[in-house]
Image (cartoon, helix red, strand yellow):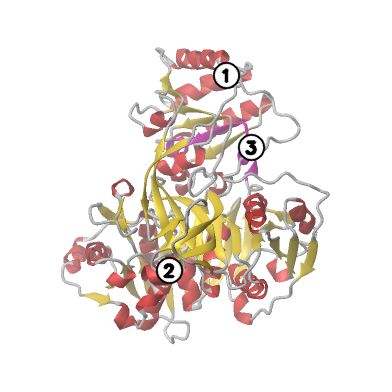
Amino acid sequence: MGLRIVSLMKQVPVPSQMRMGPDGLMDRTKAKSMINVDCTFGLEQALELKDQARDSESLALSMGPPSFEQSLRKTVSIGFDRIALLSDRGLAGSDTYATGLALATTLEKMGFHKGSKEPFVVLSGRQTSDGDTAHVPSQVAENLGIPQATFVEEMEYKGDHLICRRIIEGGYQVVRVPVPCLLSIAPTATACRRPSLKGAMRAKTVEMETWNLEKIGLPPDRVGIVGSPTIVSKVVKIQRQRPAVTMMEGHGAEELVANLVDVFQQISGREFPAYEDTRGGAARGVVERVSDKADPKFPKVDFRRGARGVMTWVEAHGTRPVRSSLEILNPARTLADRLNTKVTSIVTGFEVGDVAGEVIASGADEVVIVDDPRLQEYSILPVTAAMSQIIEKLRPEIALFGATTSGRELAPRIASRVTTGVTADCTSLDIGEFLYRRRKSIMYPCMESVRPTYGESKLATIVGFTCPQMATARPGTFSAPVRDSSRQGNVSVFHPEFRPDDFRSEILETQREEAGAENLFIADIIVSGGRECGDVDAFRLVRELAQALKEQGVNADWGASRNAVDKGYAPYVRQIGQTGKTVRPKVYIAVAISGAIQHLAGIKESGKIIAINHDSQAGIFGHADFGICRHYQDVLPELIRKVREGFTFGVAPASSASRNSGFLG
């Protein structure tokens, strides 16, 4: 047989219909479900790969309840040969670590393992819409012991390897990945094909392979709530509150814009405070935070077993640390002070010794340098090897990463290697004591990780009782620490024991078209466009408005919605939202953006939000301060003219020093 192709597919619930049951698990029984959108891109790439490889066989694999069969049969209708479902009540409540382990064990049982004589490729979507973690692909690859490439938007099969183009911060990277391997596909790839009549007929009769824990030989205590290193403590419904939108009135674009100018002239000089979330009733899970004043009825247990210290990973582009790596030093410093311990930062790269001084000035007590010419460009396998060895040596109780494209794939792979959990895209980190009812113990000191989930409709508080307790922090959520050049710290060099397999993948090309668009984090005004801005004029007017503001001396920049980025109209580095950047400008101008929850998550801290959309029913108007209901191509030219005449939305010209938000989640 030729190449065997596996596509991992998940059925996800509609976020607004999710409820939390009395057992602490999300209850999907009353929620409508659909195939995860990102997974459809993985399905299409699997079929395109099948077209390229002779005598290949395709398999769609899912993990979930029996109701997933309907979605699996849909994959047959578009061209898949086989379908399989891993279903077992013991899997309920599995976190991403346990999910990755279960799927990898199933694949191994089916003959997909690194020692297999028959070549295979596993594909998946970038992430799921209910969790948005992007963890499972890395965890499946680690458990299978195969190389990976994530955020892939193009690929070409070459027999014993694939050439993949993947999204990175500020550009793209071309990598050579040997077979067998796992690829997660970005939604900028080809959209999924439609079912054929022949496929639809076959989907009705094809036999679905069913697997459970007993058949794959995985003990129940290694999955589900019991086997998951991270546990949901509580889920809180997010209720956003901002004053009702003021819609501009007028007969044409000129009058509408003139009225907007008048409004801002009236409020000129006032502060633009961001609105706050209010949180509805909390549904509690199997663990519960213990109040400082509570009288403990159960014994306290320090679960760290000697692990001490807070570790961070410093991602470097060349010899420059990425901003998100400096941002995480803010919560790292706070956590370390609470725990009366130190912060150790790991810098990986080539000729990165000079980074140590900046990292120490930003809050680290110690810096460990991993310097190797083969690490000049980040590559997941050798960096995983280096970080895992350092973790085993230093035994930190906490490890933090920035949720960049690199951090989102690296942290879960490391977590699976060192047998711990990881929480994605955190917006708040704290230390607390938690009652674990199953163990009748109060566990301490736990890192309390809070992250938006289920389409940003809820906030989940997650804890774990294995070390290191790992988390990634969403870029822009925490402010970069104020640099203190007088701080002193220790610097050392670590020499990992690399294996040849750590360099199985080869980086062929790296292009960073922009320096990371980090100005978005400190810009006073941000102009962002939606998909329509790409369809109509390739973001010309959006960029022109931002440029006009810059010419007036305002620190302005431009961004894009996830939909626009997924369509290729703007680079990922400019994506604003849950899986992009979190920004907090004084003024945010949303141009032709619908107002999806995912996007609102990234702009909720903005001082004033202006929405321009021709659809009067667009959701963005429910979250904006001022609105103009008209086609943006009519409004922006008039707005650009006003800016060139001196109108700057009440924002003063920027000083030579960039503004720092000073925000700590």
User: Closer to the N terminus: mark 1 or mark 3?
Assistant: 1
Where is residue 325, by image quadrant? bottom right
Percent of width and height locating residue 164: 52, 64
Residue holding disc 2: 228
Q: CA distance from mark 3 to mark 2?
A: 36 Å
Residue under the image location 34 percent in, 64 percent down = 9
Magenta segment, which residues?
517-535
Residue holding disc 1: 641
Label 3: which secondary element: loop
Residue under the image location 50 percent in, 76 percent down = 146
Q: Which quadrant is home to the C terminus?
A: top right
Q: Which quadrant is home to the N terminus?
A: bottom left
Q: CA distance from mark 1 to mark 2?
A: 57 Å
Dot 2 alpha-carbon crowd within 10 angstroms: few under 14, some 14 to 19, many 20 or more: many
Where is residue 652, by image quadrant? top right
Q: CA distance from mark 1 to mark 3?
A: 29 Å
Residue under the image location 53 percent in, 21 percent down = 639
Residue holding disc 3: 661
User: Closer to the N terminus: mark 1 or mark 2?
Assistant: 2
Label 2: which secondary element: loop
Dot 3 alpha-carbon crowd within 10 angstroms: few under 14, some 14 to 19, many 20 or more: some
Q: Amino acid at mark 3?
A: Ser
